[in-house]
Image (cartoon, rainbow, N blue to C red):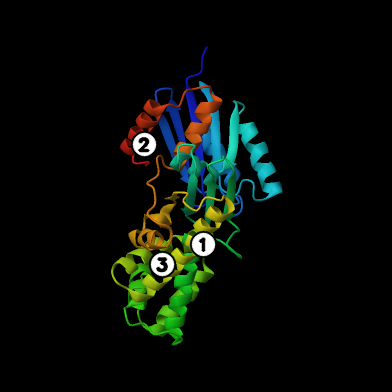
Amino acid sequence: MQKTEIVAIDGGGTKTLLLRVRQDGTIAAWRKAGGSNPFDVPEWRAVLTGLMMGQQQNLAAAAFGMAGFGESGRLSRELTETLATLCPAPHSIHNDVDMACRGAFLNGPGILLLSGTGSMAWGMGEDGQTARVGGWGSLFGDEGSAYWIGRLALARLSQCLDGRATDESGFVSRFAALQGWPEDAALCGSALQEWYANLVEVRPSVAALAVEIGRFAEQGCEIAREIFAEAAESLACHVHGLRHRLSGETLRWSYAGGTMRSAILREALTQECGAPLAPGLPPIGGAVLVAASLAGWQADERFIAQLAVSLEAEGLS
């Protein structure tokens, strides 16, 4: 009997999305779970096992866009072995930013700039050559990412609390209100240290602060605006670096990741890199295209258009 559905997974640092798609581009089912980046999430196997449970029936093929894949030989092997056990059907594993690029440009040339928990850019030149920049992790990379923004915000907060920096636009009071801490410098500092001492998953917790820091910037908080200006400058270097490596100074760029929802960040990047191209499909769409190809389906314009409508209807675009 012909199998008529495919599975696509987009696995990031803070969330993992599974999509089950029919041959006409409609969505049969979807599931969401926590992060599955093996660099950050010790229970990544359990996350993937839970998502893949019951997915084998009528499965023609699957594609996985996994954060961290290809960045560590050992972890990439572990991902490959785990997914082979969970998915005996034909499947393919790519880095999640590679998949996001495929989705944004519908397998065409371009540069995908991702800023989520971490940051990275992936590009394909007019000649089909691919390259990546960034994605070095939080210790010495991930500039402009949500974690990087959150960490910088915490640093600025500590500087304001002990007098190393001035706070003329209410950064401390905004941050204290966000966290439910006292505004008094000594009490706020104590609450900050207590919060830090009780962190369990550091990167996701710190990265989660970036959304609110973005709102502070939109409300005119100067310190928050400075943080996002620094983030934009760092992320623009990713685009410039790939344009140089791929000999494509006019290559269009697009974006993915929660941090890129910030209008202030996108506006600053537009000044540096030119106007971005709106993604043709969200990151999970790239995995759908790869899985469709593995299944021997024709992912034509009609299929892509239906998939885009289906994703929007489910709030997944």
Whether residue 190 is visible to the viewer of this picture, yes or no, is no
Which-is-in-front pick, marks 1 and 3? 1
Q: Of residues 53 and 117, which is closer to you in this image? A: 117
Give SS at disc 2: helix
Q: Position of residue 111 (x, y in %)?
A: 49, 49
Please give the name of the residue rendered at 33% of the width and 71% of the height, measured from the top-left corner.
177
Disc on res. 228: 3
How far apart marks 2 and 1 lie (CA) works out to 31 Å
Mark 1 is surrounded, within 10 Å at the Cα level, by few (under 14), some (14 to 19) or many (20 or more) other residues, namely some
The residue lying at 42 percent from left, 35 percent from top is: 30
Can you say whether 180 is above or below 161 in the image? Answer: above
Q: Amino acid at mark 3?
A: Phe
**Relative vertical location of residue 290 with respect to residue 233 in this rendering, above or below:** above
- For image coordinates 51% across by 38% down, the residue present is 9
Residue, disc 2 = 311
Spatial CA span between label 2 and label 3: 29 Å
Callout 2 touching callout 1 (CB < 8 Å)? no
